[in-house]
Amino acid sequence: MGASEQEDDIGIKPGAIITSGKYNWVVVKLLGEGGFGAVYKVHDSGDKSQEYAMKVEKKLEKRKHSKLKMEVAILKEMNGKPEYAKHFTNIVDRGKKEKYFFICMTLVGKSLDDLKRERPNRVFTMATAIGGSIQCLEAVAAMHKCGYIHRDLKPANYACGLGKERRIVFLLDFGIARRITNDDNELKTPRAQVGFKGTVRFASLACHHNKEMGPKDDCESWYYLLIDLSCPSGLPWRKLSDKNDVMSSKEEIRSEKGLKRFLSDLPLVKTEFVKILQYVDRLEYSDRVDYNFIYELMALAAINARANLDDPYDWEEEGKNKAESFRSRRCQRSLASQKF
Ligand SMILES: Nc1ncnc2c1ncn2[C@@H]1O[C@H](COP(=O)(O)OP(=O)(O)OP(=O)(O)O)[C@@H](O)[C@H]1O
């Protein structure tokens, strides 16, 4: 560790300088902490105007392989193919210190989860939910086409871009992604049993059943994301914490009655959303996903909901959101103070 670096355990503080071969990274602030480390906003000491995100992963004795390795492999591969690069951040630097590994990449904006929470009633407009979700599917479809699955799709792992890229949705966090093809580009034989991976709320049924996951499982998680972003009442299992209860709730929506109740808040897009779920449920581990079939249904859903996918996304109208949210809070306060 160089003399200029001031850091404790992993809590790298604002103002700290992290030196690497080419750069002197100045830490601006902590952006968030995950299970394995943290993400900081940084800039090179020579250029304050260009900010980046530095993802830091603690070195642990029991963990032999850095999770950042998968992140680097995927981001390099995606960025190496212009047709697939749109939804992925670019790595500009990587390094190793005594206590941690780090990568520096394109800085993006807030996650879809944070953006949704800031909305009045905590839900996106239908145009943003459908348009944003199409981009989320495009991103993971690009990974599938390159032989990877993500295994942890959720609104918190997608973020909007900054500046000119505000209309682009980026896919983040490849810590538990998996290569599904071998060196001959053939699909790997599924293992008989695998441990649970990912986030309970968005996990596919196969994941709950400890089965090998394929592209179709990312599609199922993406479907839950679509409902989470578009449905005012959210996913039916959002308040459940027990993994098996969540699984049962996911199974319930597969019955005729359950499905009807599940989409009762979304009458205008119900027909298409049912077809998408039925299509995803028919897919098997080794199936190629017909993404165009899903995009076409999403476009139809947008027409039925009178949602213009070219409209600015909700997060592009931040000032307006704040005013709306203020009005709605003021209205709630005045209702709350009324005597009946
Ligand atoms: N390139 C980036 N630019 C801006 N913010 C980022 C970037 N990458 C990650 N973040 C933000 O940093 C925070 C932590 O991200 P990270 O992916 O490490 O952890 P997590 O997803 O919260 O945790 P875990 O992986 O354990 O579930 C999140 O709020 C995320 O939106």
Image (cartoon, helix red, strand yellow):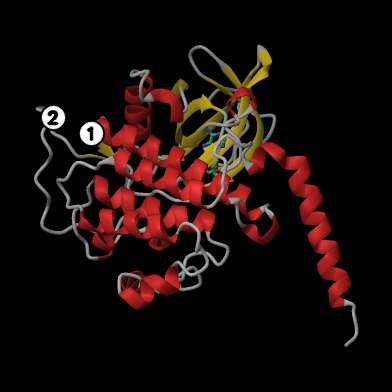
Q: Quadrant of residue 210?
A: bottom left
**Residue drawn 62% across the image and 27% down it:** 42
- In which quadrant will I find the C terminus? bottom right
**Residue drawn 53% across the image and 55% down it:** 230
Q: Is residue 308 visible?
A: yes
User: Residue 31, position in %: x, y?
Assistant: 61, 40
User: Residue 315, position in %: x, y?
Assistant: 65, 41
Q: Is residue 220 above or below residue 189?
A: below
Asked whether the beta carbons under mark 1 and mark 2 sit within 8 Å of each other, the answer is yes
Q: Quadrant of residue 249?
A: bottom left
User: Residue 66, position in %: x, y?
Assistant: 34, 37
Mark 2: which secondary structure? loop
Q: Between residue 218 and residue 233, name the one nearer to us.
A: 233
Q: Is residue 248 left or right of residue 35?
A: left
The residue that mark 2 highlights is 185
Q: Is residue 312 above or below residue 337?
A: above
Q: Is residue 135 above or below residue 154?
A: above
Q: Between residue 125 and residue 216, name the one nearer to us.
A: 125
Mark 1: which secondary structure? loop
Q: Amino acid at mark 2?
A: Asn
Q: Amino acid at mark 1?
A: Gly
Q: Is residue 74 above or below residue 273?
A: above
The residue that mark 1 highlights is 147
Q: How many labels, in total? A: 2
Q: Return the disc, 1 or 2, that comes first in the chain's sequence.
A: 1
